[in-house]
Amino acid sequence: MTRKSLTRSSVVFILVAAGLLCPARAAESKDGVQITRLDDRLRIEINGELFSEYHFKDVSRPFLYPVIGPDGLPMTRDWPMKEANNEEHDHKHHRSLWFEHGEMNGVDFWSEEPKAGRTVHEEFTEIKSGRDEGVIRSKDKYVAPDGKMVCTDDRTIRIYNRPAERLFDYEVTVHASNGDLVFGDTKEGMMSMRLAPNKFNKGKPTGHIVNSEGVRDDATWGKRANWVDYYGPVRGKTVGVAIFDHPQNPRHPTWWHVRDYGLFGANPFGLHDFEKKPAGAGNFTVPTRKSVTFRYRFYIHPGDEKEGKVAQRYAEYAKP
């Protein structure tokens, strides 16, 4: 075996066998955020436990699935990635956790209809594990149904090692690489999750939505806010997911496309739907060869927004 061929696990095994590393220290090798590349996805573990997988090959768009919260609790819906009992088979494009918009130069990148575009993973520029955090950097291209490239992006997902919670940042820089790029005025977008139905079932009062302005439940749809928290019971424990809108994002504070059946998204463009303004009022143009960056933080925590200290955690994010 050459030095280059030694994997981390091999090194740990050799050191233990030689008496240079005790088994307890060997177990510590699982500490931190470990990212492993497989054929069609990246497996992300935190302290030896599965957190999520980043699916990038032969899919309509890259997405994170599953998303596992504290105590191993599932946070997102299984369907359409996996059949599961007691789940609605609606909106097949709601793939766990994803970034897309419903109108980019007139092309729908939100749905998975035949007329929709695809976001194609091109390459990873960095995959880094670490004790305190793990990092995934990648490049993607947005392809229309006729094969024409609409634009490109660079993505960074940064996952932090926080044993009692789950905390990760999602940053996307979209480049107008093929001419002017117009994000169209539609509610269908953008940085989104589809939450687990055992957590948030439509019509049941067990789950609740609250935003930074104190607006609650159905009234949060289409409202502007720094953050939104969506919490409810999972397997007998109350747990919440908050999404933070970074102050540097376009049109901060953003509008929220959040529904009581589990759809949860930040959308800075849907003014016609959210505020009944004239069609096109929410259009946003990125000039040729320029770019725009969107930054969001996901905070998965025990309890409701008060127990999770969501407002305080947002303040830490907004002004680190």
Image (cartoon, rainbow, N blue to C red):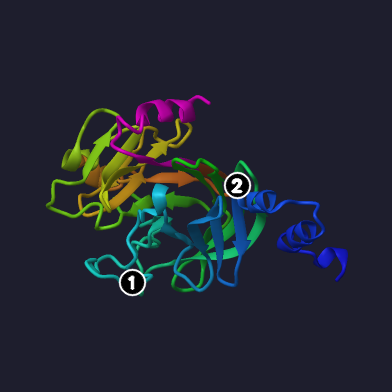
Residue under the image location 47 percent in, 70 percent down: 59
Does any portion of residue 162 appear in the rendered image?
yes
Residue 45, image x, y percentages: 54, 55
**Residue 120 falls inside the magenta stretch:** no
Tell me which segment is drawn in magenta.
294-320
Q: How many marks?
A: 2
Say which element carries label 2: loop
Query: Which quadrant would residue 96 be assigned to in this image?
Result: bottom left
Residue 81 — which label? none
Left or right, residue 205 beside residue 284 = left
| Disc on the earlier residue, 2 or 1 | 2
Q: Which residue is mark 1?
A: 113
Q: Amino acid at mark 1?
A: Glu
Q: Which residue is mark 2?
A: 32
Left or right, residue 15 beside residue 80 = right
Give above or below for 75 relative to 89. Answer: above
Q: Amino acid at mark 2?
A: Gly
